[in-house]
Amino acid sequence: MRRIVTALAAIAIIASSAVSLGCAPVDRLRYPLRYEQIVRSHAKNYDLDPALLAAVIYTESRFNARAESSAGAIGLMQLLPETARGIAVRTGGDGFAVKDLYVPEINVRYGAWYLRNMLDRYSDERTALAAYHAGPGNVDRWRDQGVEIQFPETRDYVDDVEKAKRIYADRYAKELGLG
């Protein structure tokens, strides 16, 4: 029993020290950051906020490079093979293979390019995120109809990315080169 009490006391001291130092261990556990160099590099290359790029990766795959969706999206940024093939062609790539989407550097490069294009097309982060998730065709149709995001899952996705972005900016500023 004494060992348990001692262990619990040690955990409490570590947790309170982390909080007093400005760290939120729960956020860092719940919102991990992986592939920091890749995120920073492609955020810089495509003029993206690194916290936004990390938040999209987290929301899409939880930083699982082997993630696959039921819709066929693959990798960290959950790209559909046909979308990635088009990005490869537009960015000078040749010899695209679906297996490339499991490679973190390639997946994040293509995803960052696509996200930058959505931001340029819509000039609004929330709309660009909706297009990243639901496709630009759906977003264009909603805009033509003068309505907001029509898919509840896309509204939730945009909210989740925005929340994660704030957490990544706050908790990982140093790792993301923000401060």
Image (cartoon, rainbow, N blue to C red):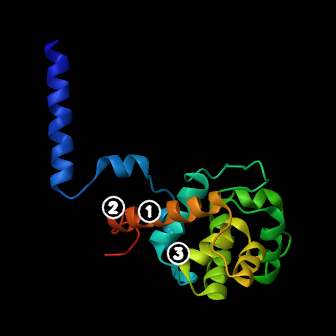
Q: Which residue is mark 3?
A: 41
> Can you name the residue that lies furthest to the front here?
146
Could you classify mark 1 by the number of other residues whose Cα lies within 10 Å: few (under 14), some (14-19), or many (20 or more)?
some
The residue at 49%/67% (across/down) is 37
Instruction: Give the spatial CA distance, label 2 vs label 1.
Output: 12 Å
- Whether residue 136 is visible to the viewer of this picture, yes or no, is yes
Element carrying mark 1: helix
Residue 54, percent from left and from top: 50, 65
Q: What's under tag 1, amino acid-wise?
A: Lys
Is the C terminus in the top left, top right, bottom left or bottom right quadrant?
bottom left
Residue 164 position in % (x across, y down): 45, 61
Disc 3 is placed on an element classified as helix
At horizontal 61% and vertical 77% (from top left) the residue drawn is 127
Is 65 drawn above or below residue 43 in the view shown? above
Q: In the rendered structure, which disc, 1 or 3, sits on the residue that comes first in sequence? A: 3
For residue 1, what is the image quadrant? Answer: top left
Q: Position of residue 123 (x, y in %)?
A: 58, 87
Mark 2 burial class by Cα count in 10 Å: few <14, some 14-19, many 20+: many
Residue holding disc 1: 163
The amino acid marked with disc number 3 is Ser
Work out whether residue 168 or residue 159 is closer to the camera in this orientation and state it.
159
Point out the frontmost of discs 2 and 3: 2
- In the depicted view, which residue is nearer to us: 87 or 31? 31
10 Å crowding of disc 3: few (<14), some (14-19), many (20+) = some
